[in-house]
Amino acid sequence: ADKLEAEVDKLRRAVVVAGGPELERATTARDAAERELDRAKADEAAVALAVQAAEKALKKSRAAKAKADKELARLQAAAGDAEAALADIERQTAEAKQTCERCVAEAGAKADELADAEAKLADLTKRLDDLK
């Protein structure tokens, strides 16, 4: 844009110095240069707006990333807590299974004792009946 402004100034000076057909050519060239300068300024403004929008989008992106990182850390902590709870449940399940197996074994032994006692009772009852 600075180059174009310098060229426009140069052409303006040429218009003042020149006369007749050269004046017309210089005026036409000056008008074209001014249009080009206006386009360059518009392009420069559009680029500035695009840069501003990109910076704003980058800021939002960084904020979203920070929020996502925070959420990820929270989820990782929750996953750690869940894994610890699962390990505790697995430990409790193993303990309960051992307790159940022990109870089943004890119940089996008691059932055997009861069967022996019933057999003895039946034998004693038969002897008693025989003695009568």
Image: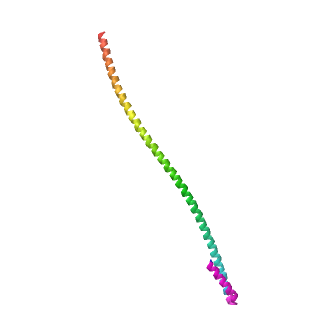
Q: Position of residue 29 (x, y in %)?
A: 65, 84
Judge from the rendering whether residue 105 lies leftward or rightward of residue 68; answer left or right. Answer: left
Residue, x 66% and y 79% (percent of image)? 34
Near-viewer residue (36 or 99): 99
9 to 104, vertically: above or below: below
Near-viewer residue (37 or 90): 90
Q: Quadrant of residue 123?
A: top left
Q: Is 112 a magenta residue?
A: no
Residue, x 42% and y 40% (percent of image)? 91
Q: Position of residue 105 (x, y in %)?
A: 35, 30
Residue, x 65% and y 84% (percent of image)? 10
Predominant SS of the magenta segment: helix
Q: Position of residue 81 (x, y in %)?
A: 48, 46
**For the C terminus, which image quadrant?**
top left
What's drawn in magenta, residue-wise? Answer: 2-24
Q: Position of residue 107 (x, y in %)?
A: 37, 28
